[in-house]
Image (cartoon, rainbow, N blue to C red):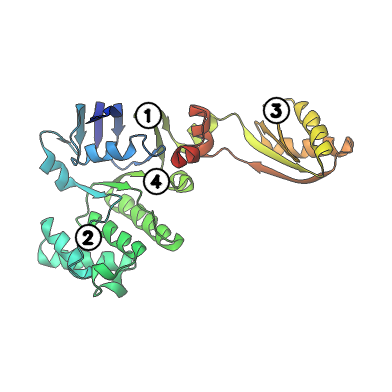
Amino acid sequence: MIDTRDLRRDFHSENGTVHAVRGIDLSVSPGEVVALLGPNGAGKSTTLRMLTTLLPPTSGSAVVAGHDVGTEPVEVRRRIGYIGQGNGSFNGLRVQEELYTQARLYGLDRHTARRRTAELLEQLQLADLSRRDVARLSGGQRRRLDIAMGIVHSPSLVFLDEPSAGLDPQSRSNLWDHMDRMRREQDTTIVLTTHYLDEADLVAERVVVIDHGTIIADGTPDELKSQVSGDLVALELMGVDDAASAADVARAVPDAGEVSVDGTVVQLRVHHGDSTTPELVRALDAAGVRLVATQVRRPSLDDVFLSLTGRSLREGEAA
């Protein structure tokens, strides 16, 4: 469904050249759900804009839905849906009119356009707003309309750039239920970017991590998290002296990684947190260390990014 080779994009200005995308090799099979992760400026959105023909590559090649993005952009656009970060709807129409017009522009006949409009208004919780002017929609409501407009023609490949930004939890859940139904019933391929790491972990069967315009990791969420050295065990102690003693006990754990102390909290990584923690608690009790609480956390996708780049994905977003 997607095949890129050494895809690159440079931006030139009077201050010099910015190499936004520095050689992306990416293959996506039909029916896959792929999440592109990386901090702001990593090249995610630029890559999506090239794959959707909105931005010409500086060099390299990309074939999307069987057609070259450079020489056959119209054929690519017929076969894809794209929901970008900005609003794609027009303020001068009502919600139902806007969605119906979009369906007709994609070539759907009147009957099919009316049916798809009614279906999506219902499924994306816009039915009660069908006669409201687009200009009067809230940010979350307008985002749901943008999503409906991007998939009204039932494309075989959907690009979602931060699709759930601004949506409340229920709307996010409904969005992914709808996407899952499209995938099951129509074998739709989905490529998304998101700042919600839990969302990527939940909905994507494959995660591609991009940093500084290149792919630095590619695999299932579990495969990527298995590269992180174990579960994180956090021990909260009664006092600073207890924390120092607990750190000594923790360092004696056979499979313990680096042990860190921050005030009254001791953290360490172990391969099997669930089985190691009870043994550690018993050792602390035997040593007379006053323990307040324990917590075991499985590796997250942010931990994956931290292990790959030396910084948190959230720190990269803030920067």
Name above or below for residue 173 compared with residue 52. Answer: below
What distance separates the C-alpha of mark 3 from that of mark 4?
A: 33 Å
On screen, residue 237 versus residue 217, left or right, reads: right
Question: Compared with residue 15, is residue 118 higher up or lower down, i.e. above or below?
Answer: below
Q: Which mark is residue 212?
A: 1
Q: Secondary structure at mark 1?
A: loop
Mark 3 neighbour density, 10 Å: few (under 14) some (14–19) many (20 or more): many
Tell me where residue 6 sits by quadrant: top left
Q: The disc labelled 3 sits on which kind of residue?
A: Ala
Question: Separation of disc 1 and disc 3 at Cα?
Answer: 32 Å
- Residue at 54% across / 39% down in the picture? 300
Disc 1: CA contacts within 10 A as few (<14), some (14-19) or many (>=20): some
Task: Indicate which label's residue lies in the foreground, 1 or 4.
Answer: 1
Label drawn at residue 89: 2
Residue type, numbered disc 1: His
Distance, label 1 to label 4, CA atoms, is 17 Å
**What residue is at 36 percent from the left and 62 percent from the top?**
140
Mark 3 or 4, closer to the camera: 4
Q: Earlier in the sequence, mark 2 or mark 3?
A: 2
Query: Which residue position holds label 3?
Result: 256
Helix, strand or loop at label 3? It is: loop
Judging depth in this view, the residue of 253 and 112 nearest the camera is 253
* Residue wearing tag 4: 194
| Label 2 to label 4: alpha-carbon separation | 21 Å
| Type of the residue with mark 2 | Ser
Q: Position of residue 313 (x, y in %)?
A: 48, 38
Label whose residue precedes the other's in the sequence (3 or 4)? 4
Of label 1 and label 3, which has the lower sequence position?
1
Residue in the picture at 29% in, 27% down: 19
- Amino acid carrying mark 4 in the image: Thr
